[in-house]
Every structure is written in structure tokens, then in C-alpha cells.
């Protein structure tokens, strides 16, 4: 597939931080639509399988934080930290009910000796689900959860990289319909909103990215990793959930493909990237 060459360190990963789902997720997690009931036992099983892939199949060092019943969305750790190289930006989530989730994440990232930057500006909001790092630059979705001031603080934190903002209208986050599927490859959903956002990203960037268009927006949220000894790895939504999108991923012959079921988290707007913070520690702990 085009884009798998190149010297990008995108996807290099040694550690992951995850958090157990709280039982309160089923009733109290934030969600756009309340139409579907979460099967919590199934959600737990799916999350355990997800963590098992990171830990056992891919050999990452996984820090597993305990659930907090007072924080129903706490399993969605991606939103509370953006990590690039040895620096971690602790965010200020857009939903006030999620602000205390940052405390456990900060302690976990401090234990990895990362450089910690805290977003203390009360005018700023940023959810990690709105942050797409391509290995070359950042795109930040301006959504109901992330504002311009949050994007500016991210740019101040990661000064080595260009930061461009992308309006997000009909979805929770930027990564509700896109993610990186390889070092130069953006996976993107097929809706008009997703395609419009991609066009904005292409116009903002000096770099030309390859795109992988999938029929389902939610399936465009996948996890690309570059693991020593395993090469290009892609965690993507299972064929029983999104069969047509899975067929697109199956064309990626250079990737180790790992289908992951995520039916329950999706009922509360959680996708694959939402449930882990991925870190590449190059210095000794």
C-alpha cells in the first residue's frame, strides 16, 4: 500500500495507559443518542479483549487504571491526555463532568517520567478525540468539546509540529470519522461531513496524504501501530459489526490486521482509539 515507506516514527509504541470501565457507564456515560442500552458485562469482556491485544499479542507495557464509579466516562482515556514523544499534555475536557478524569491519568504519566504540561486555562477545552497526529503534524477538530484556545495550547506544547484546526459539525469528535491507518495513510469515513473535513485537512497541509475511504464513519476510527518484529499493525472494527468497511481494511496486505469488537462502547460514542493512550518511551524509566 502506498505510504508504508518513509521514515515516520508514527505508530512506534512501548506503553499504553487504559482504564477499566465503570459500571455507571451503562446509565450515566455521556452520549449523543440514548436509544440503545449498554450490556455492561459484554462491554467489560470487549474491553478486556482490547487490553489483551495490546498487552499479550503486541507486547506493550500496559498501565491499567482502576474504574471510578463517580466518573462514568473514565474508560475513554484518550480524551484526557495527548502524548507525543516524551511530552504529555493533560487536557481540559469539554464536558465538565469529565474534568476529574485527568487526575489518575496525570499520576500514570508521571510514573513514566514524561514531561507533563497541564492545561490550566479555564477558557480552554480540548478532548484528545479531537486530536489527529499524522507523524508530521497535528489536526485538531473544533467541536462541541474542543475550542480554539485548547488548540492553541496544544500548538504551544508541541512546537516542533504544525497544528491546523478543522471544524467538526455533526460528530462528537474529529476522530469519530477518521484516524491514521499507516504512516502516510488517513482512514476516512464516507459521509459528507467526513469528506468535507478531509478536504479541509488536505488544504491545510503542505504534505500529500494517501486516503483509505471506508463506508462507515465509525469504522474509520482504527489504531495503527508499528511494532518491532511485527511491523505494521492495524486494530480495526470487526467484520460482524461493519462488514463492508472490514473488506476495505482486508486489502491492506502489508498490515497485520486485528479485528476488535466494540459494540457496547459505541453505544456511548466510544470508538477504538478512545480507550487507550499510546506512548513510545525512548528513554529509560
Image (spheres, rainbow, N blue to C red):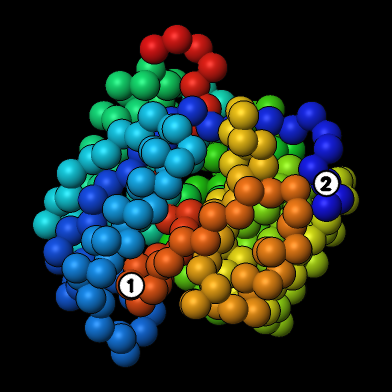
Taking the view exactly as shown, the residue that stands out farthest to the top is 284
The reply, left or right, for residue 181 in relation to residue 105 is right
* Residue at the outermost left position: 69
| Dot placed on the residue nearer the N-terminal end, 1 or 2 | 2
Q: Residue at x 26, y 29 (%)?
A: 107
On screen, residue 73 versus residue 156, left or right, reads: left
Question: Any mark on residue 207, and which?
Answer: none
Q: CA distance from mark 1 to mark 2?
A: 33 Å
Q: Position of residue 223 (x, y in %)?
A: 56, 51
Query: Residue 94: which quarter of the image?
Result: bottom left
Residue at image position (59%, 41%) is 225
Q: Which mark is residue 264?
A: 1
- Which mark, by number, is residue 3? 2
- Vertical side of 209 occupied by 143: above or below: below
Where is residue 66 drawn, in percent x and y?
18, 44
- Give above or below for 69 relative to 256: below
State the residue at coordinates (31%, 34%): 63
Q: Quadrant of residue 199?
A: bottom right
Residue 141 visible in the displayed image: no
Residue 272 drawn at (x, y percent): 47, 59
Of 177 and 163, the residue lying toward us: 177
- Give the crowd class for mark 1: few <14, some 14-19, many >=20 residues within 10 Å: many
Of 93 and 14, which appears nearest the observer?
Answer: 14
Write down the quadrant of residue 10 in the picture: top right
Amino acid at each position: 500500500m502506498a505510504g508504508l515507506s518513509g521514515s515516520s516514527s508514527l505508530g512506534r509504541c512501548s506503553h499504553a495507559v487504559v482504564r477499566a470501565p465503570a459500571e455507571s457507564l451503562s446509565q450515566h456515560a455521556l452520549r449523543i443518542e440514548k436509544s440503545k442500552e449498554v450490556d455492561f458485562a459484554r462491554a467489560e469482556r470487549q474491553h478486556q479483549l482490547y487490553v489483551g491485544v495490546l498487552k499479550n499479542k503486541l507486547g506493550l507495557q500496559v498501565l491499567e487504571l482502576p474504574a471510578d464509579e463517580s466518573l462514568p466516562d473514565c474508560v475513554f482515556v484518550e480524551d484526557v491526555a495527548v502524548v507525543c514523544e516524551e511530552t504529555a499534555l493533560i487536557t481540559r475536557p469539554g464536558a465538565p463532568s469529565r474534568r476529574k478524569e485527568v487526575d489518575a491519568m496525570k499520576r500514570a504519566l508521571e510514573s513514566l517520567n514524561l514531561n507533563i504540561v497541564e492545561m490550566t486555562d479555564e477558557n480552554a477545552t480540548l478532548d484528545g478525540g479531537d486530536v489527529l497526529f499524522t507523524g508530521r503534524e497535528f489536526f485538531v477538530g473544533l467541536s462541541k468539546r474542543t475550542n480554539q484556545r485548547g488548540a492553541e495550547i496544544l500548538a504551544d506544547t508541541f512546537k516542533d509540529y504544525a497544528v491546523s484546526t478543522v471544524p467538526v459539525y455533526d460528530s462528537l469528535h474529529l476522530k469519530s470519522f477518521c484516524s491514521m491507518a499507516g504512516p502516510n495513510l488517513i482512514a476516512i469515513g464516507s459521509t459528507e461531513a467526513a469528506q468535507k473535513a478531509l478536504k479541509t485537512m488536505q488544504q491545510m497541509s503542505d504534505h500529500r496524504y494517501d486516503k483509505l475511504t471506508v463506508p462507515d464513519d465509525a469504522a474509520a476510527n482504527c489504531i495503527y501501530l508499528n511494532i518491532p518484529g511485527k511491523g505494521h499493525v492495524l486494530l480495526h472494527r470487526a467484520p460482524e459489526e461493519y462488514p463492508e468497511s472490514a473488506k476495505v481494511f482486508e486489502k491492506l496486505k502489508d498490515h497485520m490486521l486485528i479485528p476488535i469488537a466494540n459494540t457496547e462502547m459505541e453505544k456511548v460514542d466510544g470508538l477504538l482509539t478512545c480507550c487507550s493512550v499510546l506512548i513510545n518511551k525512548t528513554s529509560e524509566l
